[in-house]
Amino acid sequence: MGASDNINIKKEVGENMQEFPVAASTTIYRGSMVTQNSGDDIAALTAGDEFKGHAMEKADNSSGSAGDINCKVLQGKYRLQVSLSGVAQSDATERSIVYASDNETYTLTQGSNSPVGRVVRYVSSGVAVVEFDTDIEFGGNFGIITVPASTYAITDLQGMASNSIDFSGVGSIKFKHGSKDYHIPIWSDETD
């Protein structure tokens, strides 16, 4: 359905605020989730969009052109208390992935929805604290990959059935997300 008014959110941690230009003919509501369009302007998140954070103020650019006004967006890693239908204590223990089906609706169902965070605390029926992170991609639907000691490019793991990756025999993993390069050393206490 999507937000049609400001949304009250309870922030637990997180202070990384960025200002972004707002897309043309768009109203961003405080507390709603946002994405960036191809012109790097923010817009309301819809299912399948890349999550870019939560708007911390209302920005009404409904009569404006792209970039006429800006909006402050909470980014990075932060925690918010949100309504989350079907959440259980086990979701916090397992750090279940939370998805968004629009700019205000959280769900535990992947489908075509956007991954936005992980459950870190069960509050009560239908309420949880979610740790959001706009700097990483969530690996909620990975398959098992056995990688020998040579170099392989892993391009797309979406749509696979398991939630684990076996990197046996690998010394490290190198990957790129956006403009950032990552290098993660891999080691094991076991011997082959």
Image: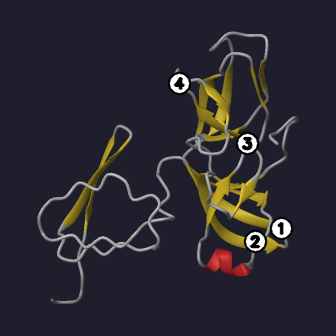
Q: In the image, what residue occupies the spot 47% across and 61% down? A: 159
Query: Horizontally, is 65 left or right of 183 in the view?
Result: right
Q: Residues within 10 Å of mark 1 (few under 14, many from 20)?
A: few
Residue that carries the numbered disc 1 in the rendered image: 126
Whether tag 2 and tag 4 are in contact, CB under 8 A, the answer is no
Quadrant in the rendering for residue 75: top right
Residue that carries the numbered disc 2 in the rendered image: 87
The C terminus sits in image quarter: bottom left
Could you give the CA–CA distance between mark 3 and mark 2, rounded to whole angstroms? Answer: 19 Å
Whether tag 1 and tag 2 are in contact, CB under 8 A, the answer is yes
Q: For mark 1, give the secondary structure.
A: loop
- Give the mark nearer the N terminus: 3 vs 1: 3
What's under tag 2, amino acid-wise? Val
Q: For mark 2, give the secondary structure.
A: loop
- Up-down relation of residue 143 to residue 20 (above or below): below
Q: Residue furthest bottom?
A: 191
Whether tag 4 and tag 1 are in contact, CB under 8 A, the answer is no
Q: Residues within 10 Å of mark 4 (few under 14, many from 20)?
A: some
Could you give the CA–CA distance between mark 4 and mark 1, rounded to whole angstroms? Answer: 34 Å
Q: For mark 3, give the secondary structure.
A: loop
**Residue 141 place in picture, x, y as percent:** 49, 65
The N terminus sits in image quarter: top right
Query: Horizontally, is 43 left or right of 105 in the view?
Result: left
What's under tag 1, amino acid-wise? Gly
What's under tag 3, amino acid-wise? Asn
- Give the mark nearer the N terminus: 4 vs 1: 4
Closer to us: 25 or 57: 25
Residue that carries the numbered disc 3 in the rendered image: 103
Residue that carries the numbered disc 4 in the rendered image: 40
Q: For mark 4, give the secondary structure.
A: loop
- Up-down relation of residue 164 to residue 6 (above or below): below
